Image (cartoon, rainbow, N blue to C red):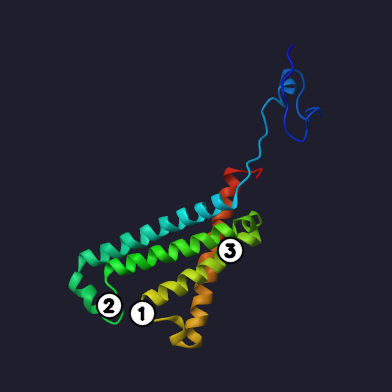
């Protein structure tokens, strides 16, 4: 019988389940731990954020294509055309995605995932209000409260959903 290379923390520990043939092979599967780098985390964050920016851009382009004249009248106070709004979405995505990547280690905990999501939600809602031509600070207390509530609820919930999905697909990480 050949010796099987065993990796992980329980190198020579006996299997706690089963006996016989099943017990012989319980340590045969190599246990590897992936290490992430800061660069990889930032790239991950930016990539995901650009996906959201793409979805928002498709939405804006779709609305514009349905009624270009109505779009021009409704957005006269903004002073931005569709291309500029899409550019703002991309810039916001790169900035927010980089922050999410920097804070990704905090998302190992449920509260960390909620906190990162809430911070990014507030950042994104604030930036979108600026892009729409009606900055939240010009609305007084209501604008600040609206950004905080929307950002915390939507962003925090998104962080928790992401955390639960990651835990379900990778239960040991």
Q: Are marks 2 and 1 in contact (CB under 8 Å)?
A: yes
Q: Quadrant of residue 173?
A: top right
Q: Quadrant of residue 131?
A: bottom left
Q: Quadrant of residue 56?
A: bottom left
Q: Badge 1: few (under 14), some or many (20 or more) residues near its Cα, within 10 Å?
A: some
Q: Which residue in the protein does label 2 denote?
A: 75
| Residue 156 shows in this picture | no
The Cα–Cα distance between marks 1 and 3, rounded to whole angstroms, is: 26 Å
Q: Nearer the viewer, residue 46 or 14?
A: 46
Counting residues from the start of the chain, the first of labels 2 and 1 encountered is: 2
| Residue 4 shows in this picture | yes
Q: Which residue in the protein does label 1 denote?
A: 133
Q: Residue furthest top?
A: 1
Eyeballing the image, is 81 above or below 157? Answer: below
Secondary structure of the residue carrying numbered label 3: helix
Q: Nearer the viewer, residue 138 or 141?
A: 138
Q: Which residue in the protein does label 3 denote?
A: 116
Q: Residue furthest front?
A: 39
Q: Nearer the viewer, residue 86 or 63?
A: 86
Residue 25, horizontal then vertical, whole percent: 71, 22
């Amino acid at each position: 019988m050949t010796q099987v290379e065993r990796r992980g923390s329980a190198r020579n520990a006996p299997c706690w389940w089963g006996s016989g043939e099943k017990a012989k092979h319980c340590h045969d599967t190599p246990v590897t731990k992936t290490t992430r780098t800061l660069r990889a985390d930032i790239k991950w964050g930016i990539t995901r954020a650009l996906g959201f920016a793409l979805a928002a851009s498709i939405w804006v382009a779709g609305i514009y294509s349905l009624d270009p004249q109505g779009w021009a009248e409704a957005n006269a106070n903004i002073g931005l055309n569709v291309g500029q709004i899409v550019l703002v979405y991309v810039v916001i995505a790169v900035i927010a995605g980089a922050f999410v990547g920097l804070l990704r280690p905090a998302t190992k905990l449920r509260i960390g995932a909620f906190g990162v999501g809430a911070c990014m939600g507030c950042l994104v809602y604030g930036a979108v209000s600026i892009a729409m031509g009606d900055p939240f600070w010009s609305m007084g207390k209501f604008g600040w409260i609206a950004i905080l509530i929307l950002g915390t609820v939507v962003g925090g919930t998104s962080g928790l959903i992401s955390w639960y999905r990651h835990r379900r697909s990778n239960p040991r990480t």
